[in-house]
Image (cartoon, rainbow, N blue to C red):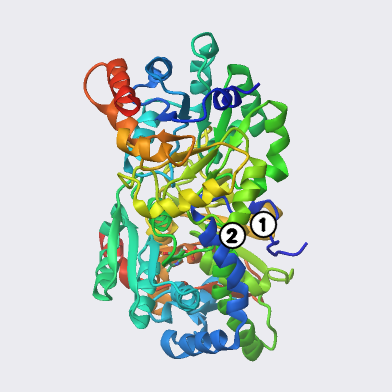
Amino acid sequence: MKVQVDERGYYGNFGGAFIPEMLYPNVEELRENYERIVQEPDFQKQLNHLLKDFVGRPTPLYLAERLSELYGAEIYLKREDLCHTGAHKVNNTVGQILLAQRLGKKKIIAETGAGQHGVATATVCALMGVECIVYMGEVDMARQKPNVERMRILGAEVRPATSGSKTLKDATNEAMRHWINNPTDTHYIIGSVVGPHPYPEMVARFQSVISKEIKAQLLEKKGKENPDYVIACVGGGSNAAGAFYHYYNEEDVKLVAVEAAGLGNHTGESAATTVLGKPGILHGSKTLLMQTEDGQVVEPYSISAGLDYPGLGPVHAHLHETGRATFYSVTDEEAMKAGILLSRTEGIIPAIETAHAFAALNQMSFNPSDVVVVNLSGRGDKDLDTYIKWGKY
Amino acid sequence: MNRIDQLFQAKKERVLNVYFTAGYPQLHDTVTIIEALEKSGADLIEIGIPYSDPIADGPTIQESNGVALANGMSLKVLFSQLNDIRAKVKVPIVLMGYVNPIVQYGMEAFCAKCEEVGVDGVILPDLPMFEYTSYYKPMFEKHGLYNVFLITPQTSEARIREIDDNSNGFIYMVSSASTTGAKTSISIGQSDYFARIKSMNLKNPTLIGFGISNAETFDKACENANGAIIGSAFIKAISEEGDLEKNIEGFVKSVID
Ligand SMILES: Cc1ncc(COP(=O)(O)O)c(C=O)c1O
């Protein structure tokens, strides 16, 4: 069974484009044009140039020797934390800004949770001299303050989302409302593999550079392209989709996705969608969704703003349903400890989102010969406040 | 015959459709509001099923959704309130809602229940036409439930034709690119759009919604369509202090008289 999107935007039972008619022309314009545009030689040339000289790709694949020794496997870190702006998010925003220009769009909007996608969007808008508005939940603005100021320094306007749980879901609602009110001159740069078709596949393709590089780097280091495991954290699922993309249909590679369990999956304070969710519709796609019996969306919780989302990308709902990927969930406490451990063993302070991926290593068992790739999606500079408040280091 | 068809056969001009959110301002106001609207002269009533994430709605309706949910409104409660509504009113009723709560209720069960209590149509802004025609249309037809689609100034002519073919009852003409309640008046620039739709001679009647708030905007809309839909302005009117039924009567009369 192949993992791929069909022409209606479905991965198996999940996906589609559940949008109000007001958004139909925008989304249709994107659907009709993006595949052609991204294949144009001029687009490819400019994208590759920016990924190399602006973002700093390829990012290293680093053998983490002390961590390997600790877990009894050969563990490689895909260093997305070394991307310009500090996380994988910029791979997508570079692609989408080039696309927006070719669609003749003059203004950019985005939503952000941890602020990484907002910063990555503000960055490419500054680079291209385009007006940028970023919606961010009020709660997230407080816990990711440095990123709010980074966006402002870059010239973006940060608008607080004050409805609902005042986090990523609500920022996404506000961005969608903004787009409904400004349909012709504005492009919406969605930050993860969520939203109506074609966004999930488009964002995954821009992020797929991660697994493309892993393949080439493993071939060089190990003489083979495929590791035994690829591990990534999942908020909406863009860094995971990028790390899995070229391995979706390589059955010998085990795909491991890690969700945030907040205070614990049975405390009512969690964001582990595959554990707590049922099929439903959010932000334009059918996916797994945390919701009440009446179909109202439940407000999730995680210490990590980037994972604090009640849904996940439809491709991940599909990987979960088919068993192609294994899902783990990790509490705040476990993630914070894993973040400190990585700092102490490898000299890398990870983003708290990313720390969740590392915490899953504790729930897995390996053979010494196993080759494991952990996608180090971002660095922890933005999370210093949270590390300090947590305090146990 | 479906009550919506009966309405448009009898009345081709100045049809007034009023929207309110079920469970707002109080959980058990639903029947009172419907009766007062019919008595005051509303021709059609659109009942909003509250949702946690109403992305096509502006602040006024968002807030009413939040209050209604906090009051305990749900589809189950709404259907129980509507149980003997047909013993009380004749006015056609449509339910407006986002698709997730309905999918959780079960689309087939929802259509059956609508027929049972006497709901005539639905407006589901985030149910794409493709999904509707591929999976759900037979359920709607089986239960005589009409599905009303939206068009906007950006909707292409080909798509308007497709929507016209797959709709029944009426077509909801969104006056301008916006969420509900965002603009306070309909502007001159919309005349082209209105004229374009008129010249297409659609098989369904049209009602203009979004930005209709008072007699002036209602009159303007009625020059360009069979009538209009008022939402946010009505929610504001029933949020006022004082007697609910008097507020409703006062508001409707101020629009149509
Ligand atoms: C460093 C980092 N990793 C992961 C995520 C989660 O997003 P996604 O699941 O789309 O990769 C975020 C989101 O803000 C992030 O900043």
- Mark 2 Cα-neighbour bin, 10 Å: few <14, some 14–19, many ≥20: many
Kind of residue at disc 2? His
Query: Where on the picture, by quarter, is residue A253?
Result: bottom right
For this rendering, which residue is in front, A317 or B26?
B26
Mark 2 or mark 1, which is nearer the start of the sequence?
1
Ligand 1, by image quadrant, is: bottom left
Q: Quadrant of the C terminus of chain A?
A: bottom left
- Mark 1 Cα-neighbour bin, 10 Å: few <14, some 14–19, many ≥20: many
Do the residues bearing badges 1 and 2 touch, measured as CB atoms within 8 Å?
Answer: yes
Chain under disc 2: A
CA–CA distance in space, label 1 to label 2: 8 Å
Q: Which residue is mark 1?
A: A10
- Position of B106 compared to A126: left or right? right
- Position of A375 compared to A367: left or right? left
Q: Which residue is mark 2?
A: A197
Residue reaching furthest to the top:
B87
Q: Residue at x 42, y 81 (%)?
A: A82
For this rendering, which residue is in front, A150 or A389?
A150
For this rendering, which residue is in front, A362 or A5?
A5
Q: Residue at x 59, y 54 (%)?
A: A17
Residue A310 visible somewhere in the drawing? no
Q: Residue at x 44, y 30 (%)?
A: B14
Q: Position of residue B35 (x, y in %)?
A: 42, 15
Residue A60 in the image: above or below residue B69: below
Q: Element type at marker 2?
A: loop
Query: Where on the picture, by quarter, is residue A27?
Result: bottom right
Chain under disc 1: A
Residue A193 visible somewhere in the drawing? yes
Q: Position of residue A172 (x, y in %)?
A: 42, 55
